[in-house]
Amino acid sequence: MKTHMSRPEFIALIAMMFATIAFSIDSMLPALPEIGRELSPENVNRAQMLISAFVLGMGAGTFFTGPLSDAFGRKPVILAGAATYIVAAALAWWSDSLEVVLAARLLQGIGAAGPRVVALAVVRDLYSGREMAKTVSFAMMIFTIFPAFAPLMGQGIIALTGWRGIFLAFILFSLISVFWLGLRLPETLAPENRRPMRLPLMIAALREMAGHPTVRLSILVQTLCLASMFVMILTVQPAYDVIFGEAENFPIYFGAIALFSGSASLLNAAIVVRVGMRRIVTWALAAQIAMTLVMLVIAALSGMHPRILFWGFVLWQTVVFFFGGMLMGNLNAIAMEPMGHIAGMAASIMGALSTVGAAVLSTPVGMVFDGTLRPMTAGVLIFSAIAFGLMLIMGRLERRQEQ
C-alpha cells in the first residue's frame, strides 16, 4: 500500500500525531497552580492528578487502539480517537469541578492513544527495517522537542486566555491533524491484511511477542528510557523553582534546550542505516550514564557555587533530552521490525506497557523531591544503567543469531 504524500509531508503528519501526547502533558504544567487555586483551593496539589489521569487514560486506551486498527483499518481508529480527545477537551474547558476535569482528562488520554499508537503502525505499513527507523527518527524529533517547548506555549496561552485556553488549544491542535490526515493520507492497511478482533487471535499475538526475546528486551528498555524522561518532566520545574529560583525563566531554558536536543533525531537519521539501531541505543545509554554520574557527584558537593551547579544541571538536562531523541525512535523500530504482520497489536502492547510502566517507576522518584537534585539524578542513573545492561544482553542474543 502506497501513499501519494511526499515523504517529508508524511513525516510531518506522523510527527504531529506523536506530538499530541507531549503537547497534552507538558503544556499543562504552567496551568496546574492556577487550576489548583480555582478548582481545589483547599488542596492545590490535587491539580497534579490532571497529568496522572491523562497518562492513565492513555495507557488504558493503548491496549485497544492497535487491535482495533488491525481489524477496521488505521484511519477510522485515528479519527475516532481524535473525536474522543476533542469532546473530552471541550468538557474540561466547560467544567467548574476538578473531579469532572479529571474525568475529562482520563477520557482525553484514551482518545489520544489512537493517534499515538496507530501512527506507528501506519509507519510500519509503509516502511520496514532501517528505513522505518529513519522515518520514525525524523517524526520522533517532534516528540522530543515538544516536552521542552510545550510549557512555553502553555504559559503564553495562559497569559492570553487563562488556564481554560489550554483546552481550546488542544481542540485546535487535534482538528488540524484530523483534517490533514483525512484529506491527504489514504488507508494504509489493505482489507485482506486485516485481523478480526477475536480473543484467540489476540492471545496468539501476545504469545508471539512474549516469545520473541528482542521484542521483550526492547519493551523493557523503552520503559526505562521513558521513565528517565518522566522523572525529568515531573521534577524539572520544581528544580528550577525551589533549587535555583528560576521559575519564571523555566520555559525559556526549556525552549533553548529543545532547539539543541531536537538535532538528536536528525543525527540518528543520518547514521542509523550505517551504524545500526542497537549500537546507537547502547552507545547513547553509556554516554547518558557517564554524564548522570558526573551530575550526581556535582549535586552531592554542597559547597559548589550556585551558578556552576545551575549550568551543570542545564547541561545535564540537555543531554537527557538529546539522547531521548536517539533512544525512543530506535527502540520502537527494533521492537516493531519482527512484528510487521501484527503491527497494530504490537504497537498497542509496546505503548501501553512502556507508558504505564514508566509512570509507575517515575512517580515515586517525583514524590521524593527534597529540594535537591539527588533524587532526580539518582533515578535517571538507575533506570539508564538497567537499560544499558539489557541492551548488552540484546547484543549477545543478536550475535548468537548471526553465528
Image (cartoon, rainbow, N blue to C red):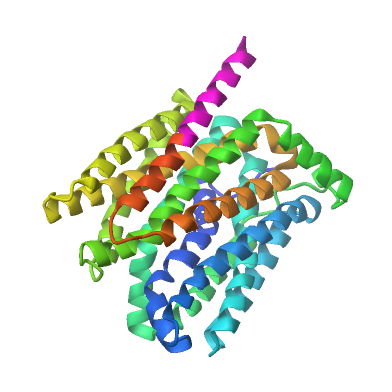
Residue at the location (46% across, 83% down)? 164
Q: Nearer the viewer, residue 30 or 387?
A: 387
Whether residue 401 is in magenta: the answer is yes
Q: Is residue 239 left or right of residue 114?
A: left
Q: Is residue 220 left or right of residue 362?
A: right
Residue at the location (73% across, 61% down)? 76
From this viewpoint, is residue 182 visible?
A: yes
The quarter of the rendered structure image containing the C terminus is: top right
Q: Position of residue 359 (x, y in %)?
A: 53, 56
- Magenta: main secondary structure equals helix
Q: Position of residue 372 (x, y in %)?
A: 28, 57
Q: Is residue 373 left or right of residue 184?
A: left
Q: Is residue 257 above or below residue 341?
A: below
The quarter of the rendered structure image containing the N terminus is: top right
Q: Is residue 11 above or below residue 151?
A: above
Q: Total marks drawn? A: 0
Residue at the location (70% across, 36% down)? 339
Q: Position of residue 299 (x, y in %)?
A: 24, 48
Q: Nearer the viewer, residue 368 or 349?
A: 368
Q: Where are the magenta residues, as a range?
A: 386-403
Residue at the location (55% across, 33% down)? 131
Whether residue 235 is in magenta: the answer is no
Q: Can you name the residue that lies furthest to the top here?
A: 403
